[in-house]
Image (tube, helix red, strand yellow):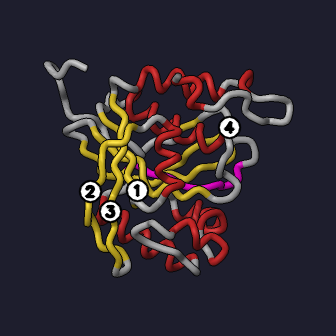
């Protein structure tokens, strides 16, 4: 991307994003609290928050209060993920560390409930968020960060096409423990190839009659 006429980008996370299987909506507690709490919070979902800077949450009131405080302080733009056909709330993710002047944002607070984990809907959600940042807003960089001990998150980042960039040692203190943070990212130069792979994997032709993938996402980037 030429920077000769560079201008500050618009902020992501303010518009709904609609795909084939899912829709992402800007968080509205009046609309989403009950369904979102059931999908990602409560004692049954405590493990989702193991490596997060906040949570777990045992009551809806605490979920809304604590999340709202951190959201406002850190400038998060959370999105609620719904099944497009049924309208059921499945999970959440959001844009974080948004730097409009540099065209850079992070996908974070990726809290996937059991109904979304390891599904085409989960991949479509990540595709839609990245596509909006790169294609609609003209961002140059899109990041993924996680606790270095969070092996599942690191595998997900690699599967989605984020390149590993290194580890920030002693990056944070969370719940009285050290966090080394693993950094991943994709750029506008990476995006055309990654976009084509996402689209090929998400195509109906890549799934059999039982809904199982025929080829892995990584195969379309080979």
Q: Residue furthest left?
A: 4
What distance separates the C-alpha of mark 4 from that of mark 2?
Answer: 36 Å
Q: CA distance from mark 1 to mark 2?
A: 10 Å
Q: Quadrant of residue 9?
A: top left
Spatial CA distance of label 4 from label 3 is 35 Å
Q: Residue at x 74, y 21 (%)?
A: 205
Camera-nearest label, 1 or 2: 2
**Mark 2 surroundings within 10 Å by alpha-carbon count, few (fewer than 14), some (14 through 19), many (20 or more):** some
Q: Which mark is residue 21?
A: 4
Q: Residues within 10 Å of mark 1 (few under 14, many from 20)?
A: many
Callout 4: helix, strand or loop?
loop
Horizontal arrangement in the rendering, residue 47 relative to residue 95 (left or right):
right
Neighbour tally class for label 3: few under 14, some 14-19, many 20 plus, Cα within 10 Å: some
Front-most of residues 137 and 112: 112
Mark 4–mark 1 distance (CA, rounded to whole Å) = 27 Å
What main secondary structure does the magenta stretch of the protein show?
strand
| Residue at the spot 30% in from the left edge and 61% down from the top edge | 74
Write down the residue under mark 3: 180
Question: Residue 147 sits in which quadrant?
Answer: bottom left
Report the front residue among 30 and 76.
76
Query: Label 2: which residue?
Result: 168
Q: Secondary structure at mark 3?
A: strand
């Amino acid at each position: 991307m030429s920077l000769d006429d560079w201008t500050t980008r618009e902020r992501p996370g303010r518009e709904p994003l609609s795909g084939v299987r899912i829709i992402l909506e800007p968080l509205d507690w009046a609309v989403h609290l009950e369904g979102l709490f059931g999908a990602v919070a409560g004692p049954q979902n405590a493990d989702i928050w193991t490596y997060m800077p906040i949570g777990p949450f045992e009551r809806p009131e605490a979920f809304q209060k604590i999340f709202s405080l951190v959201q406002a302080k850190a400038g998060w733009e959370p999105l609620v993920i719904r099944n497009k056909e049924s309208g059921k709330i499945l999970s959440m993710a959001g844009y974080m560390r948004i730097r409009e002047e540099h065209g850079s944002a992070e996908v974070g607070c990726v809290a996937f409930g059991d109904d979304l984990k390891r599904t085409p809907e989960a991949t479509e959600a990540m595709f839609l968020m990245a596509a909006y940042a790169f294609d609609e807003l003209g961002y140059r960089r899109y990041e993924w960060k996680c606790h270095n001990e969070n092996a599942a998150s690191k595998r997900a980042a690699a599967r989605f096409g984020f390149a590993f960039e290194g580890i920030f040692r002693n990056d944070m203190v969370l719940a009285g423990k050290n966090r080394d943070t693993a950094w991943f990212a994709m750029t506008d130069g990476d995006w055309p190839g990654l976009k084509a792979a996402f689209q090929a994997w998400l195509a109906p032709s890549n799934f059999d009659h039982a809904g199982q993938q025929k080829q892995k996402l990584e195969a379309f980037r080979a």
